[in-house]
Amino acid sequence: MRRYLLAGVLALIPLLARADVVVGSWNIEHLGWNNDKALPQVAHVANHFDLLAVQELMDPLAMVRLEEHLEAVSGEAWSSMASHALGRGTYEEHYGFLWRESEVAYEDGAVVYIDHGDVFSREPYSARFRDAATGDRFTLATVHVVYGDRVGDRLPEIAALADYWQWLDEIAPDTPRLLAGDFNLPPDHPAWEALRARGARPAPEGRSTLATTAGQYASLYDNLWYDAGRLTPSDRGILRFPELLPLAHQAARERVSDHAPVYVALHGAALVATRAAGGELVARPPRAGCIDLNASSANRLAQLPHVGPARAADIIAGRPWRVSELRQINGIGDGRLADIRRSGLLCGG
């Protein structure tokens, strides 16, 4: 099996067991919306992993299309699965798993968590997989924690993950666990103490979200929490994909994702970044008359759904913006952001 090293990979291995699988987690921003996603480049990045948990999947058919691109890029067979739609109000997302059939096999137990307390906006999704060569089994779960209007909106879901972690052990006893996702909270926040107390540890360090400045990265909202009692880390990393693609940093944010994937490996497997072949991709020019978050007047911005004069002033004061960052404005949550995008009024939205 080919394995490489870029900036580190985390080996997650049950004691006395051997497994050789690279596991990734990636928020592929609004995968499945009509947003000019560069799927060949997305596939190039995803091909660095043997098993990938995906957040912000907007349409399960997009997972099928990505699977097809992966098979074309890798020359290997891939499989995928997706959850049903999850969310509150008009805004919904799916979760997905993609895996390279030569390295990983689906075992059983694909299930969306039954959230009796109605804490999660998008309940976590999990499945049990096995290493195709050794038969070693492990559970991979994924979640996209609500962003909300403030950090406090995220804390109930973070706290509930401790009970979810325990539940994963109850449904698959003695199976190593891995919790992947976009948590919208860095791993050093005190809210994580309950999960840490149950033996979970965060894997990657650094920053995983692409800043608006070329080459810069912001918060470590993306992570993989591993079962420290059953898994022994050897290395870890964040795959800074813009360096691998024929796309400038800003174009990579817009056409691939504003999140970099995080990854770990089982039994010392390692990963190195490989550059994509092919010529330069050029982002499509803005449509004439569209509303530009970073250039349009207050009157034009106020024409967006749920914006109005007050929020238009907030947008101007906070420039520059990425569309997904509008959730930072008071009163614009996931549902209203979805309405803004679907209006078709935004340049590149």
Image: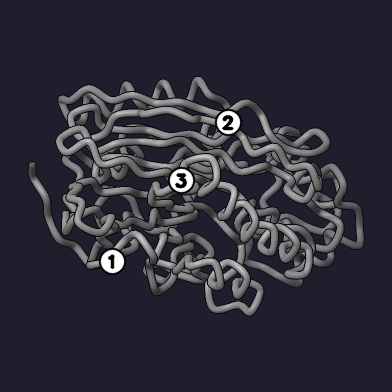
Neighbourhood count class around disc 3 (C-alpha, 10 Å): few under 14, some 14–19, many 20 upward: few
Q: Which residue is mark 1?
A: 233
Q: Residue at x 46, y 45 (%)?
A: 173
- Does dot 1 land on a helix, a strand or a loop? loop
Neighbourhood count class around disc 1 (C-alpha, 10 Å): few under 14, some 14–19, many 20 upward: many
Which mark is drawn over residue 33? 2
Q: Position of residue 345 (x, y in %)?
A: 72, 38
Q: Position of residue 150 (x, y in %)?
A: 77, 68
Q: Amino acid at mark 1?
A: Pro
Q: Amino acid at mark 2?
A: Trp
Q: Tell me which numbered mark, 2 or 3, is placed earlier along the sequence.
A: 2
Q: Which residue is mark 3?
A: 173
Q: Residue at x 25, y 41 (%)?
A: 136
Mark closer to the observer (3, 1) = 3
Q: Quadrant of the N terminus?
A: top left
**Image quarter of residue 206:** bottom left
- Left or right position of 9 against 36: left
Q: Residue at x 18, y 47 (%)?
A: 20
Mark closer to the observer (2, 1) = 1
Separation of marks 2 and 1 at Cα, in angstroms: 36 Å
Q: Position of residue 338 (x, y in %)?
A: 73, 39
Q: Amino acid at mark 3?
A: Pro
Which mark is drawn over residue 94? none
- Left or right position of 83 against 102: right
